[in-house]
Image (tube, grey):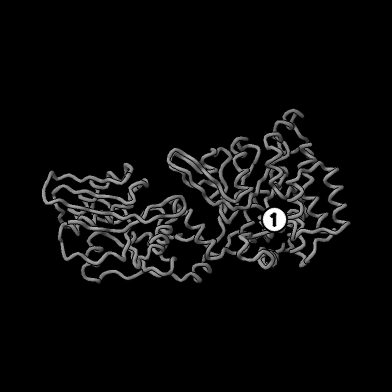
Amino acid sequence: MLAKIYSAAVQGVDAMEVEIEVNVARSGDPVIVIVGLPDTAVKESKDRVTTAIFNSGFHWPRNRTTINLAPADVKKEGPSFDLPIALGLLVCGGESEPPALDDCAFVGELALTGAVRPVKGVLPIAIAARRAGRRRLFVPEANALEASVVEGIEVYGVENLRQLFEFLSSGSGLQPVRQDLQLLFKREEIYESDFSDVKGQQQVKRAIEVAAAGGHNLLMLGPPGSGKSMLSKRINSILPPLTLEEAIETTKIHSICGLLDGKHNFVATRPFRSPHHTISDVGLLGGSANPTPGEVSLAHHGVLFLDELPEFKRATLEVLRQPLEDGRVTISRAAGSMTFPAEFMLVAAMNPCPCGYFGDPKRECRCAPGQVERYRQRISGPLLDRIDIHVEVPAVEFKELASTEAAESSENIRARVENAREHQQRRFGKKSGTSCNARMTSRQIKTHCALDESGIELLRAAMSSLHLSARAYDRILKVARTIADLADSEKIGLEHLAEAIQYRTLDRNLWA
């Protein structure tokens, strides 16, 4: 007898439908053969599945069984095929009249007791099932809320194999899981940190506001204890909220990496990733034998914070060039080539020297000139060119720390940031694919960042005196466009351009 069950396999950040064919011969040795490029975890599923069937009170035919995972030219990985394979064996075993399964898809790992365990990548699997025309999706109960955000398909959470088979046979025992997305976004949009907690640093807050308004990369340089990390961890609280499309795209990446759980099954706020400086190239960019997303992809639509930037290996920092420029990263391995989204806002922090007090008016620097030079040279010029805004973070004075005056809240700053982003969305339109000023193409820069004669002369003088690169020229125009948007100005004025230029002087003052 032949049974056909539908499931899905994760490929990069998406999924593709997999057709599972189970055929039980009328005679032959009692062996189970799995074909269709299965990995070790899939090959081992026959032992988990047969034990789970027996412990659930069912029987399966003991003749030669062939299980084909189609398409056969795509490698199948992980234990998520346990549930559909078990269902196929039960249908072939004649436990009851075969139910109609053409409109259903199944995914889940089986315990030896028959319980259904959670798996990774359920959200992209749900999207793939809907795209293939399936009306119902059966997933582990722990993954049901995650999959239920996909509209147009009924999602059922399954506790064990017996519960699933009885529901398919009788139609009772399970109810589709539904989730209120508006309530979910409202519940998740709560920030524990606020800019009102930060005393002083008005110039730095202004630079952060500009960076958030245009999605620009930011480098903060200052002595230890000046508040660089404190400021960085509050940037999320002033960024515009995620759209539904952005939230689903971000959640897919976190789902594939297994970072979702029963309490947090949907990423409704912009991610904030802060990897340690000992991270490897693979950990930051993604990779391994079977390419998986790295930190740059986990920060997609959010913030990637690199604290103590010169402490990262230089080779590791250099791999950031492609994602910073293109908003995506392509990884090629023997198993294949994968492209992951990586449109993030880079926020970096560093000390001016190894001891941290170079140029400090109150504390003496203990570093030799050669040490300072080597420390700064760990960050290459091409990487600095890709960071739009450089700002110094001075030590906070005592009178500011002791002040009882309330600082401006994140809510007020976020209102200005959202207003500036609205200007950008109207300017670019949805069809352009440009989400913010930092992602403008060369053609868009020419169209939307035109300068008058005085602005051209000011920029020419800055390029000449600061020896800035062509890439820095484009970055200055993008930042100036954002500053003008914050001021509700259609044109880039001299004051907007001058502020943008002063955000580029830091690299030439220190690295020239």
Residue at 40% across / 64% down in the picture? 130
Examine the image and state in which quarter residue 260 appears. Answer: bottom left
Q: Nearer the viewer, residue 13 or 413?
A: 13
In the rendered image, residue 236, in percent from the top left (x then y), is placed at 61, 58
Q: Is residue 324 above or below residue 431?
A: above
Residue 415 appears in the picture as rendered: no
Numbered circles on residues, count: 1
SS at mark 1?
helix
Residue at 54% across / 50% down in the picture? 297
Residue at 40% across / 61% down in the picture? 126
Examine the image and state in which quarter residue 124 appears. Answer: bottom left
* Quadrant holding the N terminus: bottom left
- The 10 Å Cα crowd at callout 1, few under 14, some 14 to 19, many 20 or more, is many
In the rendered image, residue 69, in percent from the top left (x then y), is placed at 30, 50
In the rendered image, residue 225, in percent from the top left (x then y), is placed at 69, 46
Q: Nearer the viewer, residue 167 or 131?
A: 131
Residue 323 appears in the picture as rendered: yes
Residue at 63% across / 56% down in the picture? 234
In the rendered image, residue 104, in percent from the top left (x then y), is placed at 31, 64
Q: Nearer the viewer, residue 317 or 332?
A: 332
Left or right relative to 241: residue 174? left
In the rendered image, which residue does mark 1 sit on? 211
For badge 1, the amino acid type reads Ala
Q: Is residue 156 above or below residue 336?
A: below
Left or right relative to 280: residue 94? left
